[in-house]
Image (cartoon, grey):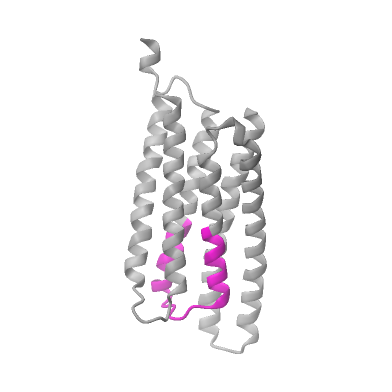
Amino acid sequence: MFSNLMPQRKQFYELLAAHSDRLVAGANAVLRLVNTLGEPGHDGAALAAEVDMNEQSADQIKAEVISLLHKSFTTPFNRDQIHALTIELDNVINALRHVAHAVGMYSIKESTSEGRKMASLIADACMRLNRAVSALSDKHRTQEIIDLCKEIESIESQADRIERQAVTKLFQDGGSPWTAMKMREFYSLLDSVLDRCEDAAKTIEEILIENT
């Protein structure tokens, strides 16, 4: 009877995986948003709304995880770690939302090669984060998770280099100072998504260290 009162440990894994699914969906919407800037038929508002929808769904999942933490007798790993990972995942989708809305807010009309590269790296990092989170329930996939986390950290470093190159190019081209300022901020927002992905990857690594 006591076991029937305990929420299944697998619920935590399922919710965390579902949370990371929303990141992949949001990142793919941002990728389409950045890649189609300036093209006929581009609908930035619809793509931003798609990111919003995934962010709202992620918020609901976050609330479910926190509620489950409050009423659970047992958890698959440390409660603080579950909470920390949930917040880190939420930070990623929030950062994606900031990128999506910055396109309209800053009236960015054209895509750039640097922006497309960074958006592609974001999609790659979120996909790897999703795979790492989804594998947490399987103790036989520890090395796979570690490798995925290392790949995310490598992607973040690559994005840092692209951002620096992009900002340098902005101020070397002799264009409008306003354009340079708004694009610098936009690149910073893109990089912030990858920073948040790296934070989540490090939290996953800490979970593995303490639970293997």
Q: Position of residue 28 (x, y in %)?
A: 44, 61
Residue furthest to the front in view is 140
Q: Between 188 and 93, which is closer to the camera in this rendering?
A: 93
Q: Is residue 97 magenta?
A: yes
**Residue 207 visible within the image:** no
| Residue 107 in view here | yes
- Does the magenta stretch mainly form a helix, a strand or a loop? helix
Residue 93 lies, with reference to residue 120, above or below; the image says: above
**Exactly how many numbered labels are in the figure?**
0
Give residue 71's position: percent from left, percent from top: 39, 24
Q: Which residues are magenta?
A: 95-123
Q: Quadrant of residue 187?
A: bottom right
Please tell me which residue is depicted at 39% across the width and 29% down the height of the picture. Answer: 68
Front in this rendered view, residue 62 or 179? 62
Above or below residue 148? Residue 174 is below
Q: Is residue 44 above or below residue 85?
A: below
The residue at the point 49 percent across, 47 percent down is 89
Q: Inspect the magenta stretch and tell me whether residue 92 lies in it.
A: no
Image position, residue 202 (x, y; %): 62, 44
Q: Which quadrant is home to the C terminus?
A: top right
